[in-house]
Image (cartoon, helix red, strand yellow):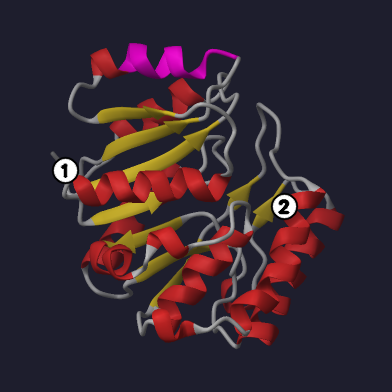
Amino acid sequence: MSEYLVVTPTYNERENIENIIRKVMSLQPGMDMLIVEDNSPDGTADIVKQLMQEFPSRLFILERKGKLGLGTAYLTGFRWALDHGYNYVCEMDADFSHNPDDLPRMFSACKEGIGDVIVGSRYVDGKISVVNWPMQRLMMSYYASKYVRIVTGMRVCDATAGFVCWSRPVLERIHLDKVKFVGYAFQIEMKYTATRLGFHIHEIPIIFTDRVLGTSKMSMKIFKEAFFGVFDLRFRNWNNY
């Protein structure tokens, strides 16, 4: 078993799942992969199970009863990672918007202690590194991160980033059962909780490329949860954390 685990939630990712798994399996240092599958009607789980025969003891699947939200999928994956002894856990999308080639340097930065949490950032150092996004969505994302920084005081340029490597001590210290948000606000909540607990977040630049195959899961409900949830974080009682 590797000390590195990639956690990838899936819902209707038939077009991408085999390619993303094969890419991760080809990388060095060797890393394991956990697919958290939300009962995709397109047969995503069947493809994963076929590939598990090719990559035994490296590729795993957790099947859930339905589409329960991005945040809960990652929390399920984090708990599984802790139970199975992994030291570094990276969350990554299935659609190649996150480049798997960035995984080795993210794991390396985390292991070397550059940060307790390593964020693959689209907006670090004032630069915007996003490909194929409509201008409206790009501006929404960019200024959402600025908004989060203003409200929370958190010094993270890409607060909504979903390409994140967590060291085991951070995941052990965060009370995962107290994480409230299920959409993209989950990403903000986890980073903010880590900073409140005294952990160091380090951002490294990546190039984010919008999916070519499959359908985006973004919705107005998810956006509203993130927008209003920031205030909940800022004024939450942190004495019990």
Q: Is residue 24 left or right of residue 41?
A: left
Query: What residue sits right under mark 1 in the picture?
Result: 2
Tell me if residue 76 is in the magenta stretch: no
Which labelled disc corresponds to residue 179?
Answer: none
Query: Disc 1 marks which amino acid?
Result: Ser
Where residue 132 sits, quadrant-wise, is top right
Q: Residue at x 76, y 72 (%)?
A: 143
Q: Residues within 10 Å of mark 2 (few under 14, many from 20)?
A: some
Q: Nearer the viewer, residue 165 or 135?
A: 165
Q: Position of residue 31 (x, y in %)?
A: 24, 41
Residue 213 can be seen in this image: yes
Q: Position of residue 133 (x, y in %)?
A: 76, 48
Query: What residue sits right under mark 2 in the picture?
Result: 222
Q: CA distance from mark 2 to mark 1?
A: 34 Å
Above or below 234: residue 33: above
Earlier in the chain: of badge 2 and badge 1, it is: 1
Residue 92 can be seen in this image: no
Tell me if residue 44 is in the magenta stretch: yes
Where residue 8 sits, quadrant-wise, is top left
- What is the span of residues highlighted in magenta in the rendered image? 42-51
Q: Residue at x 30, y 29 (%)?
A: 60
Residue farthest along the right direction in this orientation: 136
Q: Main secondary structure of the magenta part?
A: helix
Query: Contact, CB < 8 Å: mark 2 with mark 1?
Result: no
Above or below 150: residue 205: above
Q: Position of residue 203 (x, y in %)?
A: 46, 71
Q: Is residue 37 left or right of residue 53?
A: right
Q: Residues within 10 Å of mark 1 (few under 14, many from 20)?
A: some
Quarter of the image for the C terminus: give it. Answer: bottom left
Query: Disc 2 marks which amino acid?
Result: Ile
